[in-house]
Amino acid sequence: MPLLTDEVRKHIGAESAPFPACDPVEKGAVRRYAQAIMDPDPAYASDEAGARYGGAVAPPLYPAFMFRTPFGEPDVLTERAHDPDFDGLVMGVRDGLPELPLHGFALLNGGAEVEFYRYARHGETVLQKSRYADIYERETRAGPMVFVIIETEYTNGAGELLMRARKTIIRRK
Amino acid sequence: MARVNFEDVEIGQEIGPLLKGPLTTPHLMRWSAAMENWHKIHYDERFAKEHDKLPGLLINGSLKQQFIVQLLKDWAGREGWVWKVNFQFRAMNIVGETLSVWAKVRGKREAPAYGLVELDLGIRNEKGLESTPGSAVVALPYRGRAAVPYPFVPPPAG
């Protein structure tokens, strides 16, 4: 029986309206992120070192990681605390796309193609617009898997393009 | 960060490696916390093995891609620009491994305002396993000329 049902496939082309990350680029959040990736680039903390970019900036991929759970949203970790299949991911909030009906499927990051145009500066708002570009099933050495392709465009509050990403998410039983 | 001119780059030239690790459970926890992503396969060993049938706690693909971008960004310097990067997470890296991020110049082409360098890249662990094949396009300034424009403006032909 194929993993990919029409109920899943009908999400191809589904798009989110552009929406802002819940917080702007925050100095402290940038510090924790830069320390976690172990990249001590001084442009992440100093306007002087980031002068080329108009001031202190976030690491290049940072916009893709800004879409956290907004304050006041239901707590998914508590709601699903008794679900043995809950993998800890809180997907729907992060890209604005409807969750695919693939309950109990493992989720693996397959990779991405990214294009950079400018870095997000401290204090800037970042918006994203995402779409399910494709969803298909493929037989692999480890069995059948569902490949979900998500295209996302990230802009700042002035509407200037920061980066584009085409991500591959792999779902399997 | 030193300026790298397009003319000084040779095909076959190797960039890096950038070493990261050994990557321990606290490293993965710190990254999960920094991005507020609670995916259990990076800290809940029982869930990783028993539910998701994985060999152990996985080093986040989201963390590995940061290392690739860092290598390229630091090489391009302030006056260059990392335009395109792609990578595929083909094999798993397990907690405890040390990752060696590498890139190698595959080709060069000239655009009006800057040169474009095409690179192959990857992440190798101590055992020589290549987990993350990919490629990149980096813009570098011509010798004696202005830095690559910021914000980046793609070349006319795309």
Image (cartoon, rainbow, N blue to C red):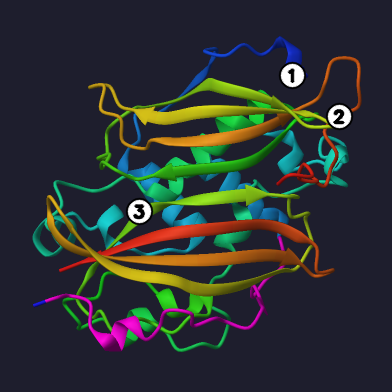
Left or right, A39 with respect to A100, comes to right
Same chain, labels 2 and 3:
no
**Whole-percent x and y of residue A96?**
53, 80
| Residue farthest along the front direction in this orientation | B157
The residue that mark 3 highlights is A110
Q: Can residue B81 be seen in this view?
A: yes
Residue at image position (60%, 30%) is B72
Are the two marked residues, 2 and 1, in contact with CB atoms closer than 8 angstroms?
no
Q: Distance between the residues labelled 2 and 3?
A: 34 Å
**Whole-percent x and y of residue A164?**
62, 58
Label 2 crowd bin: few (<14), some (14–19), many (20+), radius 10 Å: many
Residue B44 belongs to magenta span: no
The residue that mark 2 highlights is B147
Label 1 crowd bin: few (<14), some (14–19), many (20+), radius 10 Å: many
Query: Quick check: B132 above or below A106?
Result: above
Q: How far apart are marks 2 and 1 (CA)?
A: 11 Å
Query: Quick check: B114 above or below B53?
Result: above
Quadrant location of residue A126?
A: bottom right
The chain identifier of the residue carrying mark 1 reads B
Q: Which amino acid does label 2 sit on?
A: Ala
Magenta-tinted stretch: A2-25
**Whole-percent x and y of residue B68?**
51, 35
The residue that mark 1 highlights is B6
